[in-house]
Image: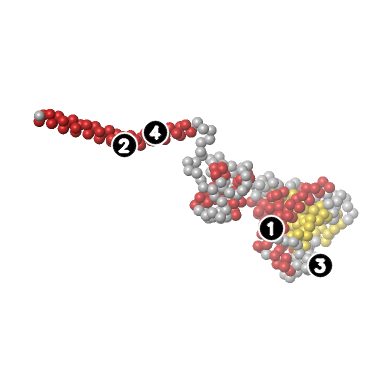
Amino acid sequence: MKKFFVILLCAVFCLSLAACAQNTEETVRQPERKEAAENTKPSQDAAAPTPAPTPTPMPVLKSGMQNEAVRQLQQRLGELGYLDIEEYTEKFGPATERAVRLFQRQNGLSEDGIAGEETLARIYADDAKECALPLAGIRIGLDPGHQKQGNSEQEAAAPGSAVTKNKVTSGTAGKNTGTPEYQVNLAVALKLRALLEENGAEVVMTHETADVDISNQERARIMNDAGVDLALRLHCDGVDDASVRGAMMLVPAGEYTKEIETQSRAAGEEIFAAYLEATDARGRGVIARDDQTGFNWSTVPVCNIEMGCLSNGEEEALLISEEYQEKCAQGLLTGILRCFE
Ligand SMILES: [Zn+2]
């Protein structure tokens, strides 16, 4: 009887041990099976044509946002050459939006300035395209009007013409400050040159300092010889009526400029519109002229911006200020960019 109890006890003990072991196995095995089930999934997905490029979805980034992801986006756009700012700020402002738009334009994406899923995937792709400078391969001529001393010697106003004009006049001057026109023209031209070069253009200037003696005919020849794609002459107006203000664009017309007339007018209209947008200057129109030596000797497309009236005190104050000159240069750049889009 005692022996029977021992056997029974042993049997119960063994059974419970087995049950215990089974339970243990069950609890250990369960997650293994789950893992195995998960592991089979990606191998099925691998057969799909496009595996997701990044394991975690990137949040949409847009104007007004401020966070670390924006800073990373700025850094990446900077590395690719689409964004050029002093330091990365975490803030999705106008410069970041412009850079996103530029990336989208150059990469055939719809241009909304929002870094959505597709845009972000392309920006962070290993083979993301570096920014192509919009004016790469374009040669722009800048002729800042006048110089320190005018030259009243005469030269033909057009090839083969008996009409002569001063080689170069001394230009107008500010009503209140007497600031000579050549100073404003040269200052804006130098600012514009820097902007054009940033955008990849090759810039040819008739002169970089005011102490020169270059006639209008010679200025046209410099542009012709350089084979510029577009020549821009920069001037300011001086008129008798001091209340008159505003900018004007002169374009070539007449028998000597037939070859370049259409292209010159198109460029003039584009640049003038952008100039008015940037400066808020009053527009006095795009005017065709057949009496300009600088036009008549030109064999390359050319136009002449009259940036404003130095004979108007208020406009004079703007034109001689560094800040407004920056706006002028920026507007002219935008117009030139549109000409070569
Ligand atoms: Zn002038």
Q: Residue at label 2?
A: 27
Amino acid at dot 3: Asp
Residue 24, percent from left and from top: 28, 36
Name the residue located 68 percent from the left edge and 53 percent from the top edge.
334
Left-right relation of 5 to 115 = left
Its colouring scheme is: secondary structure
Given this view, does label 4 or label 1 mark the residue nearer the observer? Answer: 4
* Secondary structure beneath label 2: helix
Q: Are marks 4 and 1 in contact (CB under 8 Å)?
A: no
Gap in angstroms between the C-alphas marked 2 and 1? 72 Å
Amino acid at dot 2: Thr
- Foreground: 254 or 221? 254
Given this view, does label 2 or label 4 mark the residue nearer the observer? Answer: 2
- Foreground: 188 or 104? 104
Q: Are marks 2 and 4 in contact (CB under 8 Å)?
A: no
* Secondary structure beneath label 1: helix
